[in-house]
Each structure stands twice: as C-alpha cells, then as structure tokens.
Amino acid sequence: MSENNLSMATEEVLRIEHLSINFGGLKAVDDLSFEIRDREIFGLIGPNGAGKTTVFNCITQFYRPTEGRVLFRTKEGRVEDLVGQPVHSIIRKGLVRTFQNVELVNELSVLDNVLVGAHIDFKSSGLAQALRLPGARREEKKMREKAQEVLEFMGIAALQNEVAGGQPYGVRKKVEMARTLMCGPKLIILDEPAAGLNDVETQQLAESIHQVREKYECTVLLVEHDMRLVMNICDRICAISFGKFLACGTPSQIQSDPHVQEAYLGEKEDEA
C-alpha cells in the first residue's frame, strides 16, 4: 500500500480500520474500527470472550488480521500500517505491551529484568559487549542509570538487587511496567493490569498509570475487567461484544449506552 494512503488526524496515535480476524469458521474480531489520541488513557472493554485480547494481539502482530489496517504514529512521527510487520520491529517503533500473566525472568534480579527492556536501544555489538570494550561499558552504565531511575519512579528501587521470582505479585507487576518504560514508549498496551491485585494495589496501579502518562508523555491502551478502575482512569472507552463495535465515548457515555447495558446485563435498561 502506498505510504500516501496512510493518513491519520494529527492528534491520533493509533487508528484501527475495519479490523477482522478469523480462526477457522469463527470470526473473533468483526469489522472493528476506533482511534486513540495522543496521551490519552483509552480503555477497551467487553464481556468475557468479546475479543479484547485478540484485538491487542492483532495490534502488536502476534496475530495477523484477516482484514483491516492498524495505523500507528511512530516515535519518529511516521504513520505506518503495522499489519504484516515483524513482532520485534513493533517495539522499536514505540509500541510496547504487558501480558495478562507477568512475564519476568524469575532467576534474574529486579534490575536485570528491567534492563531486558533496553535491549533494543543497545548500539554496541554482541562482541563488543562480550569483550567489555570501553564503548560497550559506557553504554551499559548509561542503561543501568536509566533503569535505576525508572525503578525509583515506580517506587521499587530498594528491591533492584533482589531476585524477581521471589517478589510479591504486585511488585512483579511494577517490574513489568518498569521494563516497558525502558523502551521509550509512544503507546503502552496493558492487558488486564489489575488482575490478581487487591484493592490497595489496584489504587496504586491507577495512580501509576496516570503518573506514567504524565512523566513519559505516552498514550495508554488497556483492557480490564475491573470496571471501577476503567471508569476512574480512562479518558475514553471502546466497548465491544463478540468482536463487534458497540460504542465509544467517555466513561459516562459508555455507562449509559443501551447497547453496552444489553451486552453486559443481557437486557436493555428500559426492559429491566
């Protein structure tokens, strides 16, 4: 497709256009379209099995859509269609994600797990790093300082030398978030970030997401079952059901939308 056909409004970071994906005879996502604006906290919600995680996987190219486009404004300001691009290249463009299950290297320290997120920015060759050449040492020192700053920001700097696998679940979630920040993200995708957290940890998570948006000047897209969290922190929300678009708007607009009420409650409000 010609680059001239890749257009987005100047305030948009991500635009999903007519996204569909089939698994055999099942259409998991069906002609879905929405856009996300710069520095917005945007929620994607829907009942169980609605296709939310599948949408995330299509955006990050873990799955290749059957139809549609995923337009993304990179860190350099270029608009690109991500469909068909290698998964590892997506991170370099400024789009990073977390997973429902925390993915850490349990045997490594908290600091080393965060440093994993910086691997895409290392300029030194593997040989230079192995030989500990001066340039490689300087680069590693700079990355370690950056990782320590991120851990300080997340409130877990005191644990940097502790083994990641021995940390409480809430701390492990923070380590994963810190790792995404090492990539210099333009857009962070959070897949059920509050899963497994208690009420206090969920409140801390909400505060962290706001702080990340402000300090790192990035956009956040999250899918989450905790509706209190979604309604409290999101600027706008897109609701889907069976892979199809239901509504998009502010939290109050989504709460009062009859199509959303029907999908969640099984009946429209005036029929209750």
Image (tube, rainbow, N blue to C red):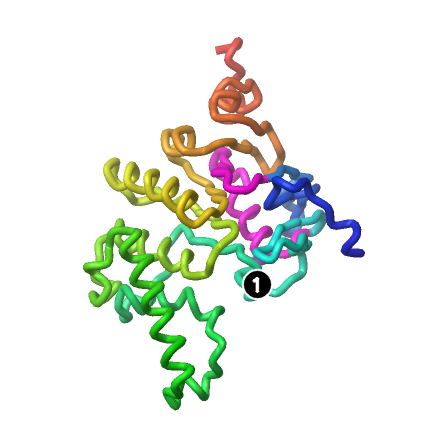
Give whichever of 36, 163 is nearer the camera. Answer: 36
Between 240 and 71, the one nearer to me in the picture: 71
Local secondary structure at mark 1: helix
- Above or below residue 240? Residue 59 is below
Direction bottom: furthest residue: 131
Residue 17 visible: yes
Q: Position of residue 264 (x, y in %)?
A: 48, 26
The correct choice, above or below, for 96 with respect to 43 in the image is below
Kind of residue indicated by mark 1: Val
- Residue 82 against residue 259 in the figure, above or below: below
Per the image, the residue denoted by label 1 is 87
Q: Which residues are magenta?
A: 36-65
Q: Nearer the viewer, residue 197 or 117?
A: 117
Residue 179 at x, y percent in the picture: 38, 60
Residue drawn at x 30%, y 45% as measured from the top left = 196
Q: Position of residue 16 (x, y in %)?
A: 65, 43
Crowding near pointer 1: few (<14 within 10 Å), some, many (20+)? Answer: some
Q: Quadrant of residue 156?
A: bottom left
Residue at image location 41% in from the left, 64% down from the top: 117
- Residue 28 at least partly seen: no
Is residue 148 shown above or below 264?
below
* Residue 50 percent coordinates (x, y): 53, 38
Q: Is residue 183 left or right of residue 76?
A: left
Residue 246 sits inside the magenta stretch: no
Is 53 a magenta residue? yes
